[in-house]
Amino acid sequence: MNDHPPLPPELFRADQVRAMDRHAIDDLGIPGIELMRRAGRAAFGELRRRWPEARTVSVLCGAGNNGGDGYVVAKLALEAGLDARAYPLAPPDRLQGDALTAYREYREAGGSVLDFIPVDFEGAEVLVDGLLGTGLDREVSGPYVAVIEAVNRYRGGVLALDVPSGLHADTGSVMGLAVRAQATVSFIGLKRGLFTGDGPDHAGEVVFDDLATPAAVQKSQTASARLLPAWRCELPRRVRNSHKGQFGHVLLLGGELGYSGAIRLAAEAAARIGAGLVSVATRPQHAGLINLTRPELMSHGIADPAELKPLLARAGVVAIGPGLGLSPWSQALLDAALASSLPLVVDADALNLLAQSPVRRDDWVLTPHPGEAARLLGWDSRRIQLDRFTAVKELQRTYGGIVVLKGCGSLVQGPDGPPQVCRQGNPGMATGGMGDVLTGVIAALLAQGAPIAEAARAGVALHAAAGDLAASQAGERGLLAGDLMPALRRLVNP
């Protein structure tokens, strides 16, 4: 049912959006109550589009401007002939400024205020969350805990105003607990926490409304993150007089004893999106197995790292980590890769080894999941997830190159500019081997001539799009990394 215009790519912290709000009020002369009325109209319009048959609306209103937006929605619902009621979580006599004005206008329109919260909001078809807004900087406490728990038990529609209550607007982490909404209408500037970590699960579909403010309002702040563009194949058309040497040679290192599948997946992914040649260096015991079902892969058994020298001489890109293990053999392969002058894609156990002996370089892509990121930074994985934006910036500052912090709302951070957030992908991709496929995808894009930053960004977008395409055909549950191969091939051949 998404008939909204595309979201703008710029994402902001909550304090930046508050500065935009002040700019609109103080410098451009737009009254604060007018912005609040516009926010209420935008939210009510979304409510009617999403739940056109609903006749009963309950609005939960907090003490700040988020609650004021809620009172505007309740007033508009009354004026539209709906059965609307407001539930204040703060005594109305504590309201100030524009929120107080909105409350009074709602009451003057005949609106009722109930001083209790139903156990399960019986009789309401839609709940509107105007409780906490973007200013939350500590765990949810007091009466808000029981109310948010009741909202999350509720089986009807839930619309959040600006940001779901309890979700940190900057980081996308849940502050103890948070409302799970079907949709969130974000005002003035998109909050970056809606798109990574816990944000997508709690925000539902994100709708944006700039409240008819001039473009100068958004431009008054520099975006602190950006949405990664969805995959669109821009690989050059191949001429008929082509040969395999024109499309790069990827060398993949990994596959410790018992872990041949990971390197096999990475290698096939590199081949499926167009690398001209794909070689695998693995344990001798695995060499004959790697290409048993994919004979196009050139598989080499490596017992001594010195045997890598001719392979490195022929390769254009090295990908290391899938199934690599943590043995002396594994460390020797990583040392050989680091000693080469080839661009690298580093994943999995290669990252765990790197965490033990950190190195910085500019010509690599690191692709950690939160656990690997925690080891690289000496943090714990919870700290990574509490603020993924800070984590990815610190990873790039420490290790250089391009860093892809995987997870819900994967982040791509280079040496310049803000991180980019991938909106695509799905929970079915939370399974073994998916990261190995991403490694192969990025390596093959590098081999085909993409600059390192573009290879990382495009690789993340392509990998996510392939996961969504594969899931659309048979569902998310049971999706395997190998299921992405046909989707990858299709997406690089539009």
Image: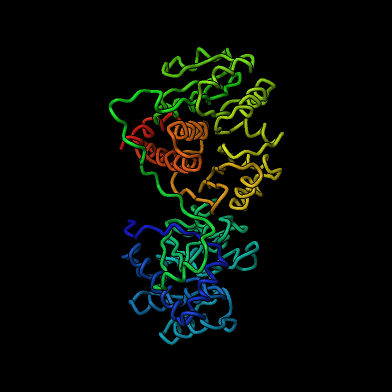
Q: Is residue 414 visible?
A: yes
Above or below: residue 13 compared with residue 278:
below
Q: Image point 41% across, 67% down: which residue?
A: 209
- How many marks the image carries: the answer is 0
221 is higher (above) or lower (below) than 197: below
Position of 422 with respect to 309 (left or right) is: left
Q: Is residue 210 above or below residue 468?
A: below
Q: Which quadrant of the rendered structure holds the N terminus?
A: bottom left
Question: 356 or 156, which lies in front?
Answer: 356
| Residue 396 located left or right of residue 29 | right
Return the x and y of residue 442 as percentages of the image width and height: 48, 35
Rendering quarter of residue 327: top right
Which is more toward the observer, 161 or 328?
328
Q: Position of residue 11 (x, y in %)?
A: 49, 59
> Looking at this rendering, what residue extends furthest in the bottom direction?
108
Residue at position x 45%, y 81% in the image = 30
Q: Nearer the viewer, residue 160 or 404?
A: 404
Residue 161 can be seen, yes or no: no
Check the image and tell me how it is coloured.
rainbow
Residue 375 in picture, x, y percent from top left = 68, 39
- At 60% from the left and 25% from the top, the residue drawn is 324
In the picture, measured across the screen, residue 153 lies left or right of residue 236, that is right
